C-alpha cells in the first residue's frame, strides 16, 4: 500500500543492512515490525547507525530492549482503552482512535522534560505512577534520530489494520519519508549481535562464589587427605590351599581324559574299602571281594563283579555312571 | 601441619561477603583473611614434640581370639591444653580399636590413652609410630608429628584343643596303679603299698608284706615317669597348605601343645623342636612349671616357610641325647616329601626311639571323593582317590619301618595324638 503511494520500501533482516539501507542519502524511516529477535546490541547499533534518518519506529513497543536503549521509556500494561489522541504530532489527526493496544509506553519525567510526547493516554493503575501512552515520540538527539515507540503490534497487521483508524495512523506514521526500511530481525542478526543482558540471568555473585566453593573444596580435600600417620606394613602369611595339588591332579586327569585309568583308580579304592569293611585283607583282589560284597549288599553277584572288574567305560557319561554305581554299592554294603 | 574440615567450612563462609559484595577482590581478601586465621591457629597450636609419650606394658601376650589393651601415657609439658587426635599405629592384623583417639591433656597434666588390640593372626606384632595431631585454639589448623614408642604384642596360638585336657588328665590319673596290672615289670615303677580292697587284681598282692602285716596288702604302681618326649614340628613348605583356612602348621602346633601339657602333667621331660632347613624354635623342658607357657610362647612367631624340610637337621636335634625317647614327628603325609626327605633318616631314629608320625589330613579330600554328581566332580573324585591311595602308600611305608602313623583332620589330630600317647603309656611302651 505504501509502495502505491510512491514510497520506496526495503525489507532487511539485519541491523547492518538496515543501517546501510537507511544511509543511502534519501530521507528514510526505519521500522522495526517485530522485536522478538531484536537484541539490545542490535537495537543500539540500529539507533547509532540511523542518526541521519527521519525517524525510527518500534511498532510493537519492543518491550525486551526498550529499557536498555536509554530513551527514558519503559513498558507497562494499559490501564484503560485510550479515548482520544490528545496530542499534536504530525502523523496523528485530532479524531483518531486506536484499538488492539498491547503495551502502554511510559516516558520518564526526564524524557518528558527532554521533549518526549505521548499520544492516546491509557491512564495508570496507580495514581502515583505516571500515565502511559499508546505511542510516544522522542525527538531526535545527538545519539539517535527521532524515535517513535508504538505499543500496538497488532494494529499494523493485515487482520486489524482496517479497524478504527489504524490504517490511517500507520500509513501516516510510516509514509512520512520517501524511503522506508522495514527491518525484520532474524536469528542470524541475533547471533551477530549477541545480547549483553542475557548474562544477567545469573546473579553477579555466582562467579566469585564458584571460586570460593572451589577453594573450600580444595581445603576440604587437603584436610581429609592428610593421613594421621603413615601406613603400617603387614607381614602377609603364605596362602596355599592344601587341596590344590589334588584339584590340579583332577584337571590333569580331565584334560588327558584317561577313562581307563580313572575307572581303575575308582574300582581299586572301592574294592579296598569294601574288603576292609567285610573283614578281608585290604589288598584282597576284586574277584574275591565281589561275591562277598554282592552277598552283603543283596545284589546279583554278576552285576557286582561287572562293576568291580568290568571293562573301562566307553565315554564320559559311562564313567560318571560307574562312579555313582560304585558309591551306591558302598552305601548298600555299609547299611546292610 | 594439617588442616581440619573446620578450615574448609571457614573458607566456605566466604560466600557471605561474596554475595554481599560480588567481586573477585572479595574472594582474594577472604582468602587472605583465611590464611591469616589458619596461620595464627597453627602458630598457637601446642607442639606435639612437647607432649611426652610413654607406653605402659611394652611386651604384651595374648591368645589369638582374645583382646589385650595397651596404654600410652601423654604428659603435656606446655602451659596450654593440648587437644587433638592420636593414632597408635599397629599392623592391620593387630586389630586396633579404636583406630584414632580424641585426646585433651590440660597444661602440665597426664592422660592415659588405651587402645584395645584384638589380633587376627598368630605371631609377633610390633607397634609402628604413634601419631599425634594437635589443633590450634580455633581448631582450623593442627600440627602433626609421628614418633616411635616401642611396643610389641606376641599373639599366642589359640590352643583350641585345651578343652580336651581335663578329660585326658583324668585318664592319666586312672593309669596310676592300674598300669602295673597289665604289664608287670618292664616300663612300670613301684610306688607304694596299700591295703587290699575288693576289686584289686589278686596278682598285685604283695605276699611278703601281707605276711608281715597279717592282712592283705597290694603293691601299687605308677606309670613310668621322666621319660623323654621329643616333639618335632615340620615348618617346611608342606605345612603351609591351608586346611579349613588355617595352615596345617597351626593344627600341628595345637597337637604339640596338648601333648606337651599332658606329658608335663605325667612328669615326662618334653622337648619341642620346630624347623625346616634350620631350627626355628627349640624348647627343652627344664622347668616343668613353665613348660607349657614356654612352648606356647616360643612357637607363637613360628610361621610356615616355603622351603623343603631338611630332615637330617631335625633328626640330629633328636639324636643329641642317646636316651630312648618318644619322638613325635608332626609333618603332613605328602608322599613325595615323605619318601625323599623323611624315610632316609627314619631307620636311624627307629633304631633308638619310638617314633610317631602325626599328619594333618584335609577334609576337603573326603568331600571331593564323595561328590560324584557330574563329570567334573567325578574327575575330582578320581584325583582324590588317587591322593588318598598315595597317602596310604606313604603311611604303610612308614609303618613297615616301625613307625606309628596318625592321619587325622585338624580338629581331631590333637586328641588322637594325646590318646596314642596315653595308650603307649598304659602299655609301658615309652
Image: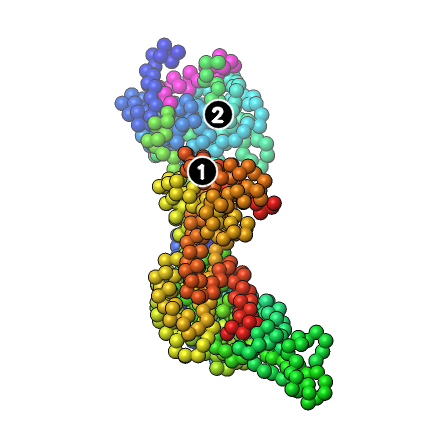
- Please identify the quarter of the rendering in which residue B392 is found: bottom left
- Looking at the picture, how far across and down is residue B429, in whole percent? 51, 73
User: Image point 44% across, 62% down: which residue?
Assistant: B399
Q: Is residue B413 visible?
A: yes
Name the outermost residue toward the bottom.
Answer: B212
Q: Is residue B334 magenta?
A: no
Q: Is residue B153 visible?
A: no
Residue segment shown in magenta = A160-184
Among the two numbered marks 2 and 1 on one chain, the one whose residue lies closer to the N terminus: 2
- Looking at the picture, how far across and down is residue B7, in whole percent? 46, 61
Numbered label tally: 2
Residue closest to the eye, A38 or B325: B325
- Parent chain of label 1: A
A90 shown above or below A116: above
- Looking at the picture, how far across and down is residue A122, in whole percent? 55, 26
- Parent chain of label 2: A
According to the picture, the residue beneath numbered tag 2 turns out to be A151
Q: Is residue A170 magenta?
A: yes
User: Image point 68% across, 85% down: which residue?
Assistant: B210
Residue A97: mark = none
2 and 1 marks in contact (CB < 8 Å): no
According to the picture, the residue beneath numbered tag 1 turns out to be A310
The mark lying in front, picked from 2 and 1, is: 1
Residue closest to the eye, A8 or A93: A8
For residue B81, side relative to residue B344 (left or right):
right
For residue A59, side relative to residue B199 (left or right):
left
Amino acid at each position: 500500500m505504501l509502495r502505491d503511494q510512491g514510497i520506496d520500501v526495503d525489507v532487511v533482516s539485519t541491523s547492518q543492512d538496515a543501517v546501510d539501507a537507511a544511509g543511502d542519502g534519501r530521507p528514510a524511516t526505519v521500522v522495526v515490525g517485530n522485536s522478538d529477535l531484536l537484541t539490545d546490541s542490535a537495537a543500539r547499533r540500529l539507533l547509532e547507525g540511523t542518526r541521519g534518518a527521519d525517524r525510527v519506529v518500534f511498532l510493537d513497543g519492543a518491550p525486551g530492549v526498550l529499557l536498555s536503549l536509554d530513551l527514558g521509556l519503559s513498558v507497562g500494561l494499559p490501564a484503560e482503552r485510550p479515548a482520544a489522541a490528545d496530542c499534536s504530532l504530525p502523523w496523528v489527526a485530532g479524531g483518531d482512535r486506536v484499538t488492539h493496544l498491547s503495551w502502554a509506553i511510559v516516558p520518564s519525567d526526564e524524557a518528558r522534560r527532554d521533549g518526549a510526547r505521548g499520544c492516546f493516554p491509557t491512564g495508570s493503575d496507580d495514581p502515583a505512577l505516571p500515565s502511559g501512552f499508546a505511542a510516544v515520540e522522542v525527538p531526535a538527539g545527538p545519539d539517535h534520530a527521532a524515535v517513535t515507540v508504538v505499543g500496538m503490534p497488532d494494529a499494523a497487521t493485515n487482520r486489524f489494520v482496517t479497524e478504527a483508524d489504524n490504517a490511517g495512523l500507520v500509513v501516516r506514521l510510516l509514509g512520512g519519508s520517501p524511503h522506508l526500511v522495514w527491518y525484520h530481525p532474524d536469528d542470524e542478526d541475533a547471533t551477530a549481535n549477541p545480547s549483553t543482558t542475557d548474562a544477567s540471568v545469573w546473579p553477579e555473585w555466582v562467579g566469585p562464589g564458584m571460586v570460593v566453593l572451589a577453594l573450600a573444596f580444595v581445603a576440604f580435600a587437603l584436610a581429609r587427605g592428610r593421613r594421621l600417620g603413615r601406613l603400617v606394613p603387614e607381614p602377609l602369611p603364605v596362602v596355599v590351599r592344601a587341596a590344590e595339588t589334588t584339584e590340579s591332579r583332577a584337571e590333569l586327569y580331565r584334560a588327558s581324559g584317561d577313562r581307563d585309568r580313572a575307572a581303575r583308580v575308582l574300582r581299586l579304592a572301592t574294592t579296598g574299602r569294601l574288603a576292609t569293611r567285610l573283614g578281608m585283607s585290604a589288598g584282597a583282589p576284586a574277584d574275591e571281594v565281589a561275591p562277598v560284597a554282592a552277598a552283603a549288599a543283596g545284589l546279583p553277584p554278576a552285576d557286582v563283579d561287572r562293576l568291580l572288574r568290568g571293562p573301562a567305560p566307553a565315554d564320559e557319561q559311562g564313567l560318571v555312571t560307574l562312579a555313582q554305581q560304585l558309591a551306591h554299592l558302598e552305601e548298600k554294603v555299609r547299611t546292610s | 601441619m594439617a588442616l581440619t574440615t573446620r578450615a574448609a567450612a571457614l573458607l566456605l563462609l566466604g560466600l557471605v561477603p561474596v554475595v554481599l559484595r560480588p567481586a573477585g577482590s572479595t574472594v582474594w581478601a577472604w582468602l587472605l583473611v583465611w590464611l591469616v586465621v589458619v596461620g595464627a591457629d597453627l602458630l598457637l597450636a601446642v607442639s606435639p614434640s612437647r607432649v611426652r609419650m610413654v607406653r605402659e606394658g611394652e611386651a604384651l601376650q595374648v591368645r589369638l581370639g582374645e583382646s589385650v589393651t595397651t596404654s600410652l601415657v601423654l604428659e603435656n609439658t606446655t602451659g596450654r591444653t593440648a587437644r587433638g587426635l592420636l593414632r597408635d599405629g599397629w599392623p592391620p592384623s593387630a586389630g586396633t580399636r579404636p583406630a584414632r583417639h580424641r585426646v585433651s591433656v590440660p597444661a602440665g597434666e597426664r592422660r592415659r590413652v588405651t587402645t584395645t588390640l584384638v589380633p587376627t593372626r598368630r605371631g609377633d606384632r610390633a607397634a609402628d609410630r604413634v601419631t599425634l595431631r594437635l589443633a590450634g585454639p580455633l581448631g582450623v589448623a593442627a600440627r602433626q608429628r609421628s614418633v616411635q614408642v616401642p611396643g610389641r604384642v606376641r599373639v599366642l596360638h589359640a590352643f583350641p584343643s585345651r578343652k580336651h585336657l581335663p578329660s585326658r588328665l583324668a585318664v592319666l590319673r586312672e593309669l596310676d596303679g592300674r598300669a602295673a596290672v597289665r604289664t608287670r615289670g618292664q616300663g612300670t615303677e613301684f610306688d607304694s603299698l596299700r591295703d587290699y580292697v575288693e576289686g584289686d587284681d589278686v596278682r598285685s598282692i604283695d605276699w611278703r608284706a601281707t605276711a608281715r602285716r597279717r592282712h592283705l596288702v597290694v603293691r601299687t604302681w605308677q606309670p613310668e615317669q621322666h621319660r623323654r618326649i621329643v616333639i618335632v614340628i615340620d615348618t617346611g613348605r608342606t605345612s603351609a597348605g591351608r586346611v579349613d583356612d588355617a595352615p596345617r602348621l597351626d593344627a600341628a602346633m595345637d597337637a604339640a601343645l596338648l601333648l606337651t601339657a599332658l606329658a608335663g602333667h605325667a612328669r615326662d621331660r618334653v622337648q619341642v623342636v620346630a624347623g625346616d632347613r634350620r631350627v626355628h624354635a627349640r624348647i627343652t623342658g627344664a622347668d616343668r612349671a613353665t613348660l607349657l607357657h614356654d612352648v606356647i610362647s616360643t612357637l607363637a612367631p613360628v610361621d610356615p616357610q616355603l622351603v623343603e624340610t631338611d630332615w637330617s637337621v631335625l633328626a640330629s636335634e633328636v639324636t643329641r641325647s642317646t636316651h630312648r625317647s618318644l619322638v613325635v614327628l608332626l609333618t603332613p603325609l605328602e608322599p613325595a616329601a615323605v619318601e625323599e626327605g623323611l624315610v632316609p633318616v627314619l631307620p636311624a631314629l627307629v633304631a633308638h626311639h619310638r617314633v610317631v608320625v602325626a599328619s594333618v589330613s584335609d577334609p576337603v579330600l573326603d568331600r571331593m571323593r564323595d561328590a560324584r554328581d557330574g563329570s567334573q566332580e567325578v574327575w575330582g573324585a578320581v584325583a582324590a582317590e588317587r591322593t588318598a591311595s598315595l597317602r596310604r602308600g606313604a603311611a604303610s611305608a612308614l609303618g613297615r619301618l616301625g613307625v606309628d602313623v596318625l592321619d587325622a583332620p585338624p580338629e581331631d589330630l590333637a586328641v588322637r595324638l594325646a590318646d596314642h600317647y596315653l595308650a603307649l603309656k598304659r602299655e609301658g611302651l615309652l
